[in-house]
Image (tube, rainbow, N blue to C red):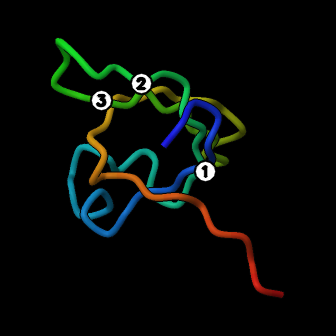
Amino acid sequence: MKVGDLVVLSAKGSRLKRNWRVAGAIGIVMEITEFYSHYDYKVRWTTTKGGLRSYDSFLKRYEIKYMKPDKN
């Protein structure tokens, strides 16, 4: 993954209780920290729950996946 990629939660990320705020949201990778950090990716999420707002979170690679376009 690179900075600027659109992501969503993976199946594993959706099962973790700490990610409840961003379930069903779309995120963009803002920063990648490869050294000295427990979490590798900083993701800014946009969610419409309770109005449009952004939310930043730090995640491991297995918690996120690339967003795929709709096939419609």
Against 23, is 47 above or below? Answer: above
The kind of residue on which mark 1 rests is Ile
Against 12, is 35 above or below? Answer: above
| Element class at badge 1 | strand
Q: Earlier in the sequence, mark 1 or mark 2?
A: 1
Where's residue 10, x and y in %?
37, 63
Q: Nearer the viewer, residue 52 or 44?
A: 44
Where's residue 55, x and y in %?
52, 29
Q: What mark, if any, has residue 32 been given in the picture?
A: 2
Splitting the image into 4 quarters, where does residue 15 fall?
bottom left
Give the residue drawn at x 59%, y 61%. Answer: 67
The kind of residue on which mark 3 rests is Asp
Q: Earlier in the sequence, mark 3 or mark 1?
A: 1
Q: Along the horizontal axis of the image, is 13 left or right of 50?
A: left
The kind of residue on which mark 2 rests is Ile
- Furthest toward the right, the residue is 72
Task: Give the total of numbered labels.
Answer: 3
Q: What mark, if any, has residue 26 been given in the picture?
A: 1
The Cα atoms of the two marked residues, 3 and 1, are separated by 18 Å
Q: What mark, if any, has residue 4 been given in the picture?
A: none
* Front tag of 1 and 2: 2
The residue singled out by tag 3 in the image is 40
